[in-house]
Amino acid sequence: MKNLDNEIWAYVLRNSIDYGKADSGRILPKLFQHGLEKKDIREALIKIQEIIEKANALSSDEKNSKFESYQAYLKEKEEVEKGLPELPSVGKDMIFRLAPFPSGALHIGNAKTYLLNAIYAEKYKAKILLIMDDTIGSEEKQLIRESYKLLQEAFDWLDVKYEKTIYYKSDRLKIYYKYAEKLIEKDKAYVCHCPQEILRKNREEGKECEHRNLPVKEQIKEWRMMFKAKEGSSVLRLKTSMQNPNPAFRDRVLFKISDREHPRVGKKYRVWPTLEMSWAIDDHLLGITHILRGNDLMIETEMEKYLWDIFKWKHPETMHTGLIKIEGIDGAKISKSKAQKEVKSGEFIGWDDPRTWSIQSLARRGIQKDSVREFVKEIGLTNHDITVPIDTLYSINRKMIDLDSERYSFVPEQIEIKIKGAPKIEDVEVTIHPDKKEKRKIEVGNEIFISGADFNDLKGKDIRLLHLYNIHLDKKKHEAKFTSLENKDIPKINWVSEGVKAKVLMPDGKWTEGLIEKSAKKLEKGKIVQLERFGFCRFDGQNKGFHEFWFAHR
């Protein structure tokens, strides 16, 4: 086997950055482009595993930095594969659609599929329709009025160029009723009164329901009676094969009765279509040509195709993309339904609470819309479920905001340190950014504050106050002795002199209070800054005597 170490490092780092952890199964096929022979596979796998272990132990920043030195060893083909693959049936008059269910805010998890639709629509200069999937939903997953606005805000912020006309399922019930009757007339649907336990047993046994084979005229009559029937007493089912290999596909529900109030139309309607029924009709009537959706909707896609075939309608191109699990997010999985409960209860401050991971919360933290779009592009259109570290988004965002972010000193949970023998220094000059020549001055007053955590970790040791001078911390008291001005290789910590009160809202919803240097008084709301050795934050304004920031990332 020829020396392939550099090539292995390149592909392992690329794979680890894209998917959080490298997978040897993805690496080996790439090496055949570089001359790997079959007789050397065993040796190559051992080398790959060694490098994977080293790469997976690196931080996100270290991976990105190391990858830059190995990137040249990737074959040109790899760069093509990283882009978005071409879709089938590309041509003029392509139409994509966004179909969100208005039960909460768009979040980083479900934004992926919507953005893929939008990015492909841009690529092919196609139309994209915004269709609010506001069928009635369930008790567990309820519609909420504010969600309509939240979804539009998110799409607008992400620069999704949807058509001006917005479609609402709740305005199209009569259309769905019309096609329900057509299905009944074709003897393809029937009204079922069976309780759940009977239905479940029938499905397991492949047995037809007693209501299934009533004459069409009786079925039309039963359908019309549904509009006055009690909630839960009947449903309209699609006739499929009761021997279908997938029991869940046997005689699926098309319409159900619900007395729940709808946020847009109140109690105007009681008989509501399932999502797949409404999708099948709308995707045809609205001329949708390409559907990108998650793997979790496979059975719904089969249902649509079944209905399109009944009506002899042309099928749109339907592509499925893998679900995304984001690694490194505090708390439970991201969920609109979960967030809805916590917003309603007051546990969250609102839909922009960082714990919702909503698009609004990311914007308020200082995550750039182009970072979110680039994050989705890097994931790409793959039908494999993947795990992606949140650090991937942070790494992209860091590159976008770093050069323009002003630096400030911030000390959390500050304590004052009395320094003996320190020279009188009025100010120090520091560069505004390591890659810029411009400098700024930091005033030095009579009081010096450091963080309580730094004192506890370093008491009794020599340290350097960043950009200022060296001191020796007392072991017990909040005191120190000046030792020298020389920039020695000793621990360096932040300090603030004559600062202003500040607090930072962290991603876990908790506030970190402290002091920030007083030059931060000039900050305008919305400005993104780097609090040195703490992280990038967005200034959210002044509130009750505090400069408030929202934490973005390290």
Image (spheres, helix red, strand yellow):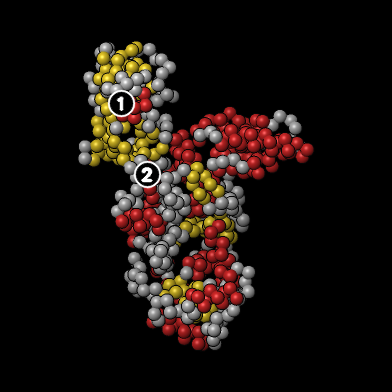
Q: Where is residue 534 in the image (x, y as percent from the top left)?
A: 37, 32
The answer to which of 124 and 399 lies nearer the viewer is 399
Query: In this picture, is 294 found above or below 37?
Result: below
The residue that mark 1 highlights is 450
Q: Are marks 1 and 2 in contact (CB under 8 Å)?
A: no
* Residue 429 seen: no
Residue at 54% x, 65% y is 300
**Is residue 44 found left or right of 170 in the rendered image?**
right
In the picture shown, does residue 238 fall above or below 421? below
Q: Which of marks 1 and 2 is nearer the N terminus?
A: 1
Q: Is residue 241 visible?
A: yes
Question: Callout 1: few (<14), some (14-19), or many (20+) C-alpha neighbours within 10 Å?
Answer: many
In the image, residue 237 sits, relative to residue 476, either above or below, namely below
Q: Which amino acid does label 1 sit on?
A: Ile
Q: Which residue is at 37% across, 29% downward?
A: 532
Q: Position of residue 4 (x, y in %)?
A: 69, 31
- Secondary structure under badge 1? strand
Q: Where is residue 485 in the image (x, y as percent from the top left)?
A: 35, 12
- From the image, tell me which residue sits under label 2: 508
Where in the figure is residue 438, as x and y percent of width and height? 37, 22
Q: Which of 352 and 373 is in front in this view?
A: 352
Label 2: element kind: loop
Query: 440 left or right of 253?
Result: left
